[in-house]
Amino acid sequence: MKLAEFLAQVRDRGEYRSQEEAEQISTAVLGVLATRITPEEADDLAAQLPAPLDDVLHRESTGPQSLGREEFLRRVAEQTGARPRTAEWDASAVLSTVADAVSGGEVNHLLSQLPAGYAELFGRPGLS
């Protein structure tokens, strides 16, 4: 998926005013996700995402931190200046687009590394 298509999907799903806002939210969400997954998983995911979003995963990946869903959303809210409920909306807009942009195997691999509760952010009921 090309960057413009990815951002258009995020913009539509998140009901953002502009492509720039969609990119800012995408960068924030992917940056927080990168702190939650292994550097190897970040590389695998980055390989399937368009530049410059792939760079966010490399820049932020330092090794997996144990973040439950609520802490993940709190950090997204902190990055975006949003309220927790808005952060959930933002994360879902980005991560469900990620799930559409990458292979099903990659989504399953990601979800297998994350605690319960993350699958719905990816627009999935669980592993498929």
Image: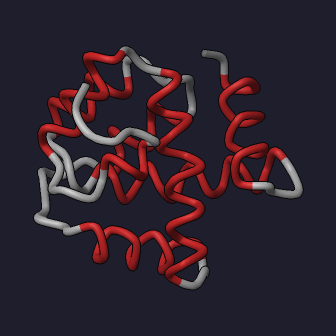
Viewer-nearest residue: 48 or 85: 85
Image quadrant assignment for residue 74: bottom left
Q: Residue 1: image x %, image y %?
A: 60, 15
Q: Residue 50: image x %, image y %?
A: 55, 23
Viewer-nearest residue: 122 or 73: 122
- Residue at horizontal 55%, vertical 46%? 94
Is residue 91 found left or right of 89 in the rendered image?
left
Quadrant in the picture for the C terminus: top left
Residue 62, compared with residue 51, is above or below; it is: below
State how the image is colored: secondary structure
Image quadrant assignment for residue 117: bottom left
- Residue at horizontal 33%, vertical 42%? 125
Find the residue positioned furthest to the right: 17
Q: Residue 16: image x %, image y %?
A: 80, 56
Find the residue positioned furthest to the front: 125
Residue 95, compared with residue 79, is above or below; it is: above
Viewer-nearest residue: 47 or 12: 12
Is residue 116 found left or right of 16 in the rendered image?
left
Image quadrant assignment for residue 113: top left
Is residue 63 found left or right of 14 in the rendered image?
left
- Residue at horizontal 11%, vertical 65%? 66
Is residue 89 found left or right of 35 in the rendered image?
right
Q: Residue 6: image x %, image y %?
A: 66, 29
Residue 60, compared with residue 97, is above or below; it is: below
Q: How many marks?
A: 0
Residue 14, compared with residue 56, is above or below; it is: below
